[in-house]
Image (cartoon, rainbow, N blue to C red):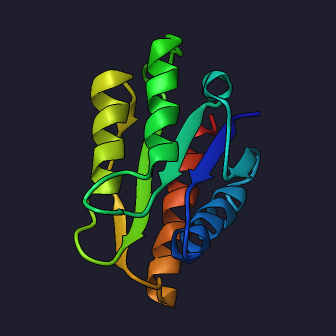
Amino acid sequence: MPKILVLYYSRTGNTEKMAKAVAEGAKTAGNVQVDLNYFVEAEDLGGFDAILVGTPTYHHDLPIDIKMLFEEAAARNIILKDKPGAAFGSFGWSGEAPKFVLEIMKNKFGMKIAEAPLLTKYVPDEKMLDQCRALGKRLAESLIP
């Protein structure tokens, strides 16, 4: 059974709402295991078939927790090559952190990035949460033979 990680960081709860919707959507695809987590060890990343990361943008950058996770995974040579990856997040001003996540996934780890990140300003509305569910479902369905 394919395993999907929906990892998120959220200080205000907005990105957390998006992460929960992504996980809900992934679960509707059927025969997949979905882990929704606020924290994982770098070594655990290799055990997932796909990784979706939710991150807000703070001061035009990634939160330190997400940045350190990727740095540790790189230092430990965690293999993520060709695994599907996606990103999403909320922001107040600039919104580039999910784009940075996709760049790291693609350029550092060789992951497959199929689409642009989902971004919302401040609190996600129901339309955005539906888009999050659809993202989770699409990614999960891509793993099911």
Residue 81 versus residue 121 in the image, above or below: above
Residue 50: quarter of image: top right
What residue is at 53 percent from the left and 76 percent from the top?
Answer: 14
Asked whether 79 or 12 is in front, the reply is 12
What residue is at 64 percent from the left and 43 percent from the top?
Answer: 5
- Quarter holding the N terminus? top right
Asked whether 39 or 81 is in front, the reply is 39
Residue 38, given in percent of the width and then of the height, sits at 67, 53
Residue 12 versus residue 56 in the image, above or below: below
What residue is at 58 percent from the left and 48 percent from the top?
Answer: 141
Residue 135, given in percent of the width and then of the height, sits at 48, 60
Residue 120, given in percent of the width and then of the height, sits at 36, 76
Residue 56, given in percent of the width and then of the height, sits at 42, 63
- Residue 103 is left or right of residue 64, and the answer is left
Is residue 142 in view from this perspective?
Answer: no
- Residue 81 is left or right of residue 3, and the answer is left
What residue is at 73 percent from the left and 47 percent from the top?
Answer: 35
